[in-house]
Structures are given as structure tokens and as C-alpha cells.
Amino acid sequence: MRAGRPASSATVPRQQAEPDDGRRLVTEHLSTAPGRLPEWVLPLARLPGHVHRDQLSRFTPAPAAVPRCSAVLALFGEGEGGPDVLLTERAATLRSHAGQVSFPGGAVDPGDPDAVAAALREAREETGLDPSGVVVLGALPEVYVPASGFGVTPVLAWWREPSPVAVVDPAEVALVARVPVHDLVDPRNRFRVVGPGGSVGPGFRAGGLFVWGFTAGLLSRLFELSGWDRPWDRARVEPVPPRAAGQPPDQPEAPSC
């Protein structure tokens, strides 16, 4: 079934944003894009510069903590199933977040000019993405992730000219997928997740993937803020499957702290 095109008449919050370069990035990157953005992309394009950190996460770093900087690429394109988002599944052998579904991304290196450059570089290294076909819509406020101690900058982008993507290094990434937005916002594929440590957050099942944690939380907020969200059963709760929690299927989940 072909995915439906998200509604373009969504209203977007226009609250005062924290000082960041989101608005500047929109101007710089969109000015180089030929033609107008597709109508379905506009709700996303309006978010940078108008979203406050508190709208993305309830977590803030401890006063003495200095989060390590990282960036992820929330790349939306239009595939055979309609608008979709690029996701990866981390290798089961990784030391952290093994088996989890995530946006392409990683730590900001000293040679990266900014978070946008880091997100594009990591996406290229993980999936073979050609950045020349990507139009950056802007960066959202940095979100603190307590589980890793990272401050993560989400970079929103439109995949103007999709390039082939695949696993580049199996030691880091097990799977690369373009997941239709229609499937992710389908109420039948949504629920709340009880994580191995007892935390509760949004979850999705789509394209054979179980999405939870930071990635699911950010997707859920993006869908709400863009107006793409559909009512779903928030009383439905599911545990994290062992594979998605980075554990062999024959072992129990890690006990809560």
C-alpha cells in the first residue's frame, strides 16, 4: 500500500526559540536549493528556529555535567511508499545502544565545522549517502540524552535527490532502511515502551523495525510539531524485544537499576 502524503495544512508552534543557529541554517542551506520545497516538507522546514528545547525533551544535564556533542540526521525523502525517513539499525556487537534503531549520526569530531557537517559526514560513513542530494532545513536545539551523556543536535533535512544507501561497515550498522512516514504514524504501529531500565517512552513498529528510546522520542515529537500525528492508544505498553535492547534472544532483559 502506498503511504499517504502527510497533511500540509498543519499548524506549527511559533514559540520564541533559544539562541541557536537554526534560523540562519535554514536561510543558508535553502537558498542553495533550486525550486520550491515540496508542500509536504513545509511543516518540517518551519520547525528550526521556532522549537524550544523543552518541546523536544524533559531532560537537562546536571549542573556539573558537560555533555559530549553529537548530531543526528533526520532525513525525510519521498520513496515508493510516499514520504519516508532514513533509519539505521546499529550492529548487535557495539558496546553502546547495540541493536537499536537510530537516525544516522554520531559524535561531532574536531574537524567538523558544526553539527550539520557532523550529521552529514556520519550519514555518509554509515549509509553511503551522497550529501549533495540533501537540502538541510535546519538544526533543532540540542537534546540531552542521559543514557549516553551526549548532547544531541537533530538536523532536519529533505532528500531532494535520493542516492543509493546501504550498510557500509557491518561492524557499526546492521541495516539501513527508508521507513514510510505513513507506517510510523499509523495508530496500529504505535505504543509506549518500557525500557530495560524501567523508563517509559514512545515506540513504533514499522518496516520490520522496533523503534524506541531517543529515536522514537524525537520522531514522536516531530510528528506532533509538524501536525502529522494521529491519535493512538497511549495505554498500550510493550517491552523492548531482546534484539532491540542489544541482548541475545535467549537471555533475559537487563534488570532495572
Image: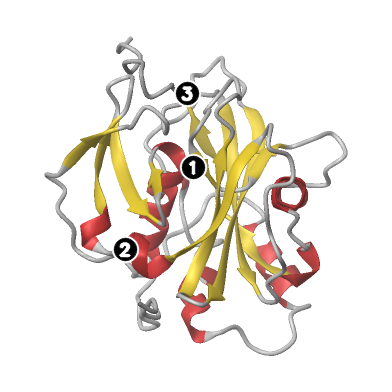
Q: Does 255 appear above or below 61?
A: above
Point out the image quarter for the C terminus: top left
Q: CA distance from mark 2 to mark 3?
A: 26 Å
What residue is shown with label 3? 147
Give the mark nearest the N terminus, 2 or 3: 3
Q: Mark 1 highlights which residue?
A: 101
Q: Residues at badges 1 and 2 in contact (C-beta under 8 Å)?
A: no
Callout 1, which amino acid?
Val
Residue at the spot 41% in from the left edge and 57% down from the top edge: 207
Residue 59 is left or right of residue 145, and the answer is left
Q: Amino acid at mark 3?
A: Ala
The residue indicated by pointer 2 is 185
Q: Alpha carbon of mark 3 to alpha carbon of mark 1: how far? A: 15 Å
| Label 1 SS | strand
Query: What residue appears at the point 63 percent right and 62 percent down from the top-left corner?
Result: 138
204 or 232: nearer the viewer: 204
Task: Say whether marks 3 and 1 touch (CB < 8 Å).
Answer: no
Can you give x and y, in whole percent of width and height, for residue 232 in the image?
Answer: 18, 58
Q: Give the colouring mode of the picture.
A: secondary structure
Residue at x 40% of width, y 80% of height = 5
When the figure is inspected, residue 51 is found, relative to residue 34, above or below; the finding is above
The kind of secondary structure element at disc 3 is loop
Furthest toward the left, the residue is 235
Query: Separation of disc 1 and disc 2 at Cα?
Result: 17 Å
Question: Within 10 Å of the Cα at label 3, are there few (<14), some (14-19), or many (20+) other Cα atoms?
Answer: few
Q: Is residue 174 left or right of residue 56?
A: right
Q: Residue furthest front?
A: 250
Place of residue 94 in the rendered image (x, y in percent of width and height, measured from the top left): 61, 25
